[in-house]
Image: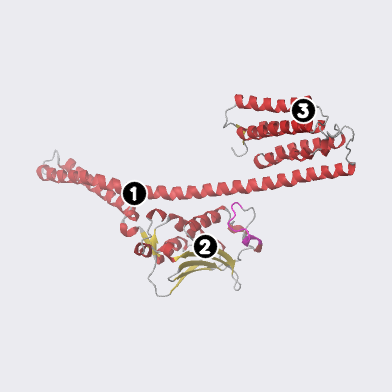
Amino acid sequence: MRHRLRLQTLTRLRWLAVFGQSAAVLIISQGYSFPMPVAFCFVLIACSAWLNIFLTVRFPAAHRLPPLAAMAVLSFDVLQLSGLLFMTGGLSNPFSVLICVPVIISSASQPVPYTLGLGALSVTAVTLLAFFSLPLPWHPDNAFTMPFLLIAGIWIAIVSTTAFAAFYAYQVSVEANQLADALAATELVLQREQHLSALDGLAAAAAHELGTPLATISVVAREMEKALGRDPRYAEDVQLLRSQSERCRDILRRLTSLSAADEDHMRWLPLHSLVEEVVAPHREFGIGIDVVTSDDGSPEPAGRRNPGILFGLGNLIENAVDFAANRVIVEVVQDREKVEITFIDDGPGFAPDVLAQIGVPFMNRKNRTNREQAGGLGLGLFIAKTLLERSGATLTFSNNAAPPGARVCVSWPRDKMDIADNAANGRLDPQRR
């Protein structure tokens, strides 16, 4: 749907053009009494209004035009405006610059080949208008003639404005689409984590609801075993019933353990447990990971288990391990004002040009020097950065002076990471965590 232009957008713009063109023709012909082919001008304006009426009746307001249809509609706008300019002075008409508008609209919403085709049509129309047009409406006794050198300058201005504005609109549109895609991927990651948490809750609810009837079945099975245990006709079946009820109890017990994160004592993570949970999965890849902690003597902060923080920090440590030569250092600093986690690797570090655009999704080139095989930092780092910033963190990316390597520092205000401090000050917001 990205390259489908909404029809209602075009019709609204065209109605604005119809009213503007009509007002301009009336003011010039009636207000100033300048001679001009009014009837032919209104025929062209009526064609534009008729097209709007046809499209409005034929298609619903939310209809989106495919690229070819959008190009046809925009081409009509170029030709209609060119016809009006031909009858009102060509490029000497001050409104001739408006011929670049359809190209700009196309560049922001349509594929590049269609925009180039529309641009070629516009340039052709402007070139023809530079040589062929009726005189500019002016005082009958004092004909206005614009020097050709000025006409050439206007031609250059219109063509360059069209090219520059179209390229700028295209670039902004591409970046906006990339950002939208990356944010959508971020939302998918969060939804996945939330679904996993919801499954844990469902497991706990199932274990709780099934526990009572299963306990009743177990009691009945024991009573039946006492009464019929020596009867060869029923002994084997009764024993099987009791063993299966015990097996069900074991399954429910495991389900309950899966949802331990929903229990009060597992809903929060001390800082050292958070770091260890992030680091542990990456210790078996041949790269040494050292965790270095320092504090000012204040109690260890403990925050609610936040899937976004876990995923974001996990992505950073994974990236550090991928690019490290031998070792990764995780520095954990806490005091009464902030909590700071820094990842330092002994790899090649960030390329200078990459530091300026880190966090931009879908980067096309490799992002570390001399380590092409390790991949890039595009969408994954964007998601990690977005999730961590949503939790209140500030991220800083840099290179070590000596020895070489990359440094990523994640810093939170203390109250963003300490549930005990929030509760003591009446600021606890479980939904935020």
The residue at 18%/40% (across/down) is: 237
Q: Which amino acid type corresponds to the residue marked 1 in the rendered image?
A: Gly
Viewer-proximal residue, 95 or 388? 95
Look at the image and tell me in which quarter the N terminus lies.
top right
Residue 357 belongs to magenta span: yes
Q: Which residue is mark 3?
A: 41
Lower sequence index among marks 1 and 3: 3
| Number of the front mark, 2 or 1 | 2
Secondary structure beneath dot 1 equals helix
Q: Position of residue 163 (x, y in %)?
A: 75, 45
Dot 3 amino acid type: Cys
Q: Do labels 1 and 3 touch, CB within 8 Å?
A: no
Q: CA distance from mark 1 to mark 3?
A: 70 Å
Residue tagged 1: 201
Q: What SS does tag 3 mark?
A: helix
Queried whether the magenta region covers residue 32, the answer comes back as no
Q: Nearer the viewer, mark 1 or mark 3?
A: 3
Q: Which residue is mark 2?
A: 394
